[in-house]
Amino acid sequence: MYTKDIHVVKVEEGSIVTPKGFKTAGVHAGLRYAKKDLGVITCDVPASCAAVYTQSHFQAAPLQVTKDSIAVENKLQAVVINSACANACTGAQGLKDAYEMRALTANHFGYLDHHVAVASTGVIGELLQMDKISNGIGMLSPINSNEAAKDFQTAILTTDLVMKKACYQTTINEQTVTVAGAAKGSGMIHPNMATMLGFITTDAKIESAVLHEAMKSITDVTFNQITVDGETSTNDMVLVMASGMTDTEQLTPNHPDWDNFLLALHSTFEDLAKQIARDGEGATKLVEVNVTGAMSDDEARIIAKKIVGSNLVKTAIYGADANWGRIIGAIGHSDATVNPDIVDISIGDIQMLKASQPHSFSEELAKEYLENKDVIIHVDLNLGSGNGTAWGCDLTYDYIKINASYRT
Amino acid sequence: MYTKDIHVVKVEEGSIVTPKGFKTAGVHAGLRYAKKDLGVITCDVPASCAAVYTQSHFQAAPLQVTKDSIAVENKLQAVVINSACANACTGAQGLKDAYEMRALTANHFGYLDHHVAVASTGVIGELLQMDKISNGIGMLSPINSNEAAKDFQTAILTTDLVMKKACYQTTINEQTVTVAGAAKGSGMIHPNMATMLGFITTDAKIESAVLHEAMKSITDVTFNQITVDGETSTNDMVLVMASGMTDTEQLTPNHPDWDNFLLALHSTFEDLAKQIARDGEGATKLVEVNVTGAMSDDEARIIAKKIVGSNLVKTAIYGADANWGRIIGAIGHSDATVNPDIVDISIGDIQMLKASQPHSFSEELAKEYLENKDVIIHVDLNLGSGNGTAWGCDLTYDYIKINASYRT
């Protein structure tokens, strides 16, 4: 029997500038009253890159500009991001402004226009204050330090309560390769303060096309498997830049250490995704739903996301109420294949449903478990070998409070 | 030009026994502490009938029994309903109990087994207390009075705050034909107190197959277009019984007065559906979303339901916040065809978005409008001629309160 060790280590103190070749900065451009609101990540060399974008029909202007940049030669040397204004639903002027933001950044650093990506997050339907953007870009002096990374992590936040970053290392051709990231998002959308953004850096040596395939499939099982309120923003984007500054062979799926790289990338994505779910608007808990025994991984993921996105499941978990009927409700409602007579459900280690019929359990122990900060639900459909996971949070009074008077 | 008048009149004092041939009763069988919990509608003759059922994978036992009854000869003479226990996720014993409930009812009234339909609503995963069901059925003495109708309307409620009934009359072959109904439901699901149920009576003369086609298409634009929390219960059912006791020609789509009948049926369904949406758990407002200019009616309905089901739209309306960005978010997220550059949005008469760009409006007047008990949102996609409407309610602190500790 052939077995293989896959090694990945979490680097607690790491940040987006831990991978070789990256620098960053975050400044207060004056788009917000006091908080930092403009950030940049730069790379010493044109980096391989790949991105995924919101599925919304309404894609904001900066996404179009970023797509346009990447299309030219699949290389990026900088990504510039502002918070406070999403530059969405802003028509021709908005698009012009996003191109101008790209040109100003390219000019400031002496890069080619098409080596610069642009992202925005904030209020929908308002134009960027280009004088402030222009001034802010002039103030950007990226360096390689964790302090600068903190400035960047802060500059991209909107309603988030905490900064989100992750860093993992692995070994490729006996060299250390690092993957790191920063993210924002605390609802899948808060239009008028929208967006989930993820920026990933790595010093792996990899072609853009290969990187794109890897990041797409990992996004499907990480960022696309979190839900706070079932909504999608106009500005969502996840962007990966690979400097290639480690002295290894080119990474491809045929490389003997490919699985190491994939796991490092996966770990970074999943870590950031879970941080976003945990920081969901008003949330007090991270909820993880594992579905096994589905007809396919796709169907398992669909059901997991349905459960974690159910308002009734979310409120029951907020109330530490072991209400498995709501999980049945969410499963029953999905398009995936289900045999309604053979489903098992556990919350934590406590089995509540066996072969679709109630399994007696201690309500007291269940309540105790549900009062944890992390709640895991396990559903076994007992049909096939498909597995999938989704993450979310509970639905609380504070969600209503935050969103009932968001703009006022 | 040929025009046609379609006449339907709402009968405020009408109830399920206003159509000729029907009687009803509601009693306290002891399944709940004090409230009435068992009801029946009977018909003097075997009535034409048609039903639609929940799409959930987990269909409760009574639904299977009802399907079985109708399959025999498409005639029903009674429907018996209990609240407090849904008889769902109860396996073989649950199915046996539902058949027993049917047999007891048939025996009590001297009807054929397959002329009796069964419905249940309440806690999932618990067995019916058959001794109480049996006693309760023995107590049922249906009569034709609005008081008895009130007893029935009460007996089928769970978390509902108000009874739901409607009655409309129209003219077929110069005879008055009546359609009436009673319903329950205040979330699309409250597992462990589940279910939307609708029971419609009419004295129209119509074959079951024709009735089924009509009720299916009307259900799609009424009961299937309401959402409280996006969930579907294990027990949802809408059942129509037609006594045929008016002296008219058989109703078919070729009958000159067919449109009158259709509108009476439609009005009854829509009226009940809106009552359910308005009584959504914790709701303070009824929200109606009208979508026009879609590629098809189906796509218009999909978008309307997406908007009315968005947590962010629902909380903004609770907060009387004219946050059109959330409507954009919900539209953007749907599978329907959208041109993101030409969408118009109004709330009430106040236009907020024109050709996908902000249209200036008075925040003060918008807030004033949003403080009404009824809020209407209008979205024009400006693409085609498809129209659709959906109804829902706002998302409030009380929804969290009701659902966070439902069982405790």
Image: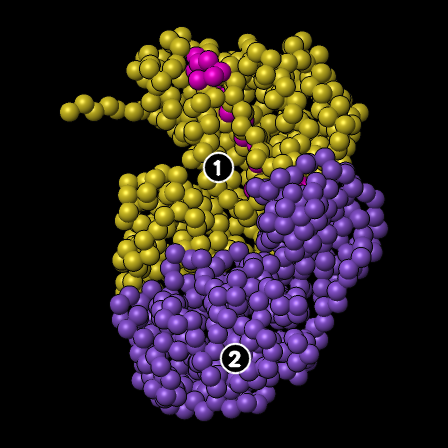
Chain colours: A yellow, B purple
- Locate residue B94 relative to residue A281 in the image: left or right: left
Query: In the rendering, which numbered label is found on residue A362?
Result: none
- Picture layout, residue A211 above or below residue B202: above
Q: Residue B44, position in %: x, y? A: 48, 86
Give the residue displayed 31% in from the left and 84% down from the top.
B131
Q: Residue B64, position in %: x, y? A: 36, 67
Q: Mark 2 or mark 1, which is nearer to you?
A: 2
Give the residue displayed 46% in from the left and 31% down from the top.
A219
Give the residue displayed 36% in from the left and 13% down from the top.
A175
- Picture layout, residue B251 above or below residue A6: below
Give the residue displayed 53% in from the left and 68% down from the top.
B211
Q: Amino acid at mark 1?
A: Asn
Q: Main secondary structure of the magenta part?
A: loop
Chain letter, disc 1 residue: A
In the foreground, B175 or B316: B175
- Picture layout, residue A209 above or below residue A281: above
The answer for how far apart the CA atoms under marks 2 and 1 are is: 52 Å
Crowd class of label 2 (few under 14; some 14 to 19; many from 20; radius 10 Å): many
- Residue A25, quarter of the rendered image: top right
Q: Residue A378, position in %: x, y? A: 34, 49
- Secondary structure found at label 1: helix
Query: In the rendering, which numbered label is found on residue B243?
Result: 2
Tally of numbered discs: 2
Q: Is residue A198 magenta?
A: yes
Which residue bears the numbered disc 1? Answer: A224
Residue extent of the magenta highlight: A188-210
Q: Is residue A105 magenta?
A: no
